[in-house]
Amino acid sequence: MAKPEERVCVVYSGSDSSQDGPCSIQSFTLPDPKTGRPQGFMLSGSQLMELQHFKCMYSSWFIGERLVADGGIYLGTPVDPLLILLPLLDKARGKTADSPGVFRGLDQ
């Protein structure tokens, strides 16, 4: 069984957070609302966050007594889930060159 790779991730926890220390994070990929290309997102508790990765050429982290060779840092910033739905809603309105389109009910 392969040992999981360690990464450093900074996550906004909000002012009402009562939990200190490690938390459960689920990461996944969704289409970027602007470009449509795959973008990393994560779910921390009930908060949806966009995942950005920053890395310098020569960097590493010391975590306790361990050295993490990948010196990159992942930054999770809160995102409104509606932002992810906007492109899907725009496609669903049936916009054409002749008509701006209309929004329809879910049953149509």
Image: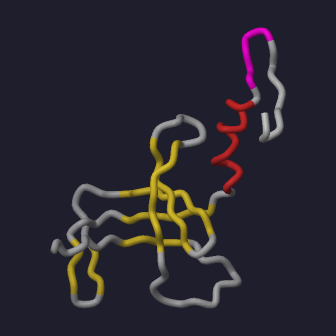
Q: Quadrant of residue 33?
A: top right
Which residue is at a point 78% across and 33% down the rendered structure image?
108
Left or right: where 13 falls relative to 28: right
| Residue 16: x %, y % from top left | 70, 84
Which residue is at a point 81% across and 14% down the rendered structure image?
99
Q: Quadrant of residue 27?
A: bottom left
| Residue 77: x %, y % from top left | 57, 62
**Quadrant of the image for the N terminus?**
bottom left
Q: Please, is residue 21 above or below residue 84 in the view?
A: below
Q: Residue furthest top?
A: 98
Left or right: where 4 falls relative to 51: left
| Residue 42: x %, y % from top left | 50, 63
Q: Residue furthest left?
A: 1
Q: Residue furthest front?
A: 107
Q: Is residue 79 magenta?
A: no
Q: Main secondary structure of the magenta part?
A: loop
Which residue is at a point 25% across and 70% down the rendered structure image?
5
Residue interval drawn in magenta: 94-98
Left or right: where 21 falls relative to 55: right
Q: Please, is residue 27 above or below residue 66 in the view?
A: above
Q: Please, is residue 43 above or below residue 104 in the view?
A: below
Which residue is at a point 55% across and 72% down the rendered structure image?
44
Colour treatment of the image = secondary structure
Q: Nearer the viewer, residue 51 or 54?
A: 51
Q: How many marks?
A: 0
| Residue 98: x %, y % from top left | 78, 9
Q: Nearer the viewer, residue 64 or 104?
A: 104
Left or right: where 18 falls relative to 26: right
